[in-house]
């Protein structure tokens, strides 16, 4: 068995090879993109009829490299960059050293693995992120249009972004420069709306065939967009040992510094996919309005203090995420938390 540590970069990568006893065999550099790296690993396997294991850090576009390496290596580990403290906090860092450390971690079977979903799940995730980007752009255009009307001292019609509202703005008298700005903003607004509808049609098609999405939509405040994003990023819920780990995965748990009997909790970690975290918090605001059990939980967490509302809503979002993970595991629909009645 050969253990290959790979420090991969787009135009050039370093490889470190250890033998079955953990001794260094050789180190070399491969110039070129991922096909050259895969070919180098293939030659290693064929030269002495060796079985090859490979480890490299997760990076942009690493899924294709992972799938191709799986065809030539018996084991491929994709390391989570944030958990590679041995490399991340090292005082001496270069491609050769990083490749050597990855090879040693692979030999010791100590690689902190990152999950690589299948191609169709990666496409689903990209559509979720594309919709988020398009919605953000549309919001920016709406704000620009509001700002233009305010600058000109014009009153925004009621329902500004409905068909009637946009038509009313188009009919308002403006000077040439302001009229041009208005026309371009309205054109961009309409185009952004059409792009979002195209993406949503494709998302609807993907979600239609997945029963997990309809199951999660039984949660109060969780619509299709939140449910499909949650399913796409969780992928296989079995990869989480406990449902509570989903709170950590989506960055909804506080940072912790505990030592010598002192336990300090800070802001939430904000690790994991920010788009799902944002959707869960939006869903939590709706859930506390619709579900009596969650409303009671929210009020208890607030403790009658307005300044604790944001802390409480993040706790509700974490509760929703963990509950949704448990629902995916068990297949049961949403059950509201019991409302604690106050003693007379």
Image (cartoon, rainbow, N blue to C red):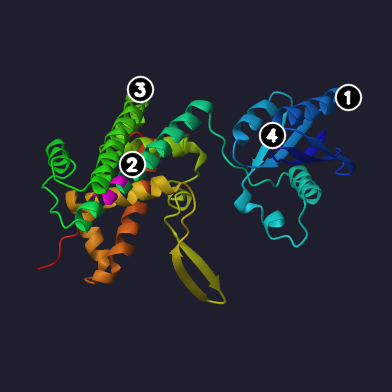
Residue 76 disc label: 4
Quarter of the rendering containing residue 85: bottom right
Look at the numbered discs 1 and 4 and tell me whether their residues touch, using CB distance below 8 Å.
no
Give the residue at x 19% y 56%. Answer: 152
Secondary structure of the magenta portion, mostly?
helix
| Residue denoted by label 1 | 47
The stretch of residues the image draws in magenta is: 141-145
Q: Is residue 203 above or below residue 81?
A: above
Q: Give the camera-side residue of 175 and 343.
A: 175
| Residue denoted by label 2 | 135
- Could you tell me which quadrant the N terminus lies in? top right
Earlier residue among tags 4 and 3: 4
Give the residue at x 45% y 54%. Answer: 251
Mark 1 crowdedness (10 Å alpha carbons): few <14, some 14-19, many ≥20: few
> x, y percentage for residue 35?
72, 27
Earlier residue among tags 1 and 4: 1
- Could you tell me which quadrant the C terminus lies in? bottom left
Earlier residue among tags 3 and 1: 1
């Amino acid at each position: 068995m050969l253990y290959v540590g790979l420090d991969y970069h787009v135009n050039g990568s370093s490889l470190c090879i250890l033998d079955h006893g953990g001794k260094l065999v050789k180190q070399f550099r491969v110039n070129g993109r991922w096909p050259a790296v895969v070919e180098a690993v293939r030659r290693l396997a064929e030269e002495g009829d060796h079985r090859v294991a490979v480890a490299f850090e997760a990076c942009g576009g690493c899924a294709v490299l992972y799938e191709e390496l799986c065809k030539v290596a018996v084991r491929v580990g994709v390391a989570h960059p944030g958990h590679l403290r041995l490399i991340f906090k090292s005082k001496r860092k270069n491609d050769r050293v990083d490749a050597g450390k990855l090879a040693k971690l692979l030999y010791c079977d100590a690689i902190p693995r990152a999950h690589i979903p299948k191609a169709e799940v990666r496409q689903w995730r990209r559509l979720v992120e594309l919709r988020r980007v398009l919605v953000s752009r549309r919001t920016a255009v709406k704000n620009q249009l509001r700002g233009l009307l305010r600058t000109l001292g014009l009153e925004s019609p009621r329902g500004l972004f409905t068909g009637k509202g946009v038509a009313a703005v188009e009919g308002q008298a403006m000077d040439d420069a302001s009229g041009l700005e208005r026309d371009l903003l309205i054109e961009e607004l309409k185009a952004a709306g059409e792009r979002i509808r195209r993406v949503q049609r494709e998302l609807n098609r993907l979600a239609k065939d997945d029963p997990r999405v309809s199951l999660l939509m039984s949660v109060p405040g969780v619509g299709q967009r939140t449910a499909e994003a949650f399913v796409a990023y969780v992928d296989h819920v079995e990869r989480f040992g406990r449902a509570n780990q989903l709170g950590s995965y989506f960055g909804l748990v506080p940072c912790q510094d505990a030592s010598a009997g002192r336990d300090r909790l800070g802001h939430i970690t904000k690790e994991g996919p920010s788009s799902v975290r944002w959707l869960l918090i939006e869903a939590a605001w709706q859930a506390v309005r619709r579900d009596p059990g969650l409303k009671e939980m929210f009020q208890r967490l607030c403790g009658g203090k307005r300044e604790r509302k944001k802390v409480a809503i993040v706790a509700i979002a974490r509760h929703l995420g963990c509950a949704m993970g448990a629902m995916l595991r068990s297949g049961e629909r949403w059950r509201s938390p019991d409302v604690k009645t106050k003693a007379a």
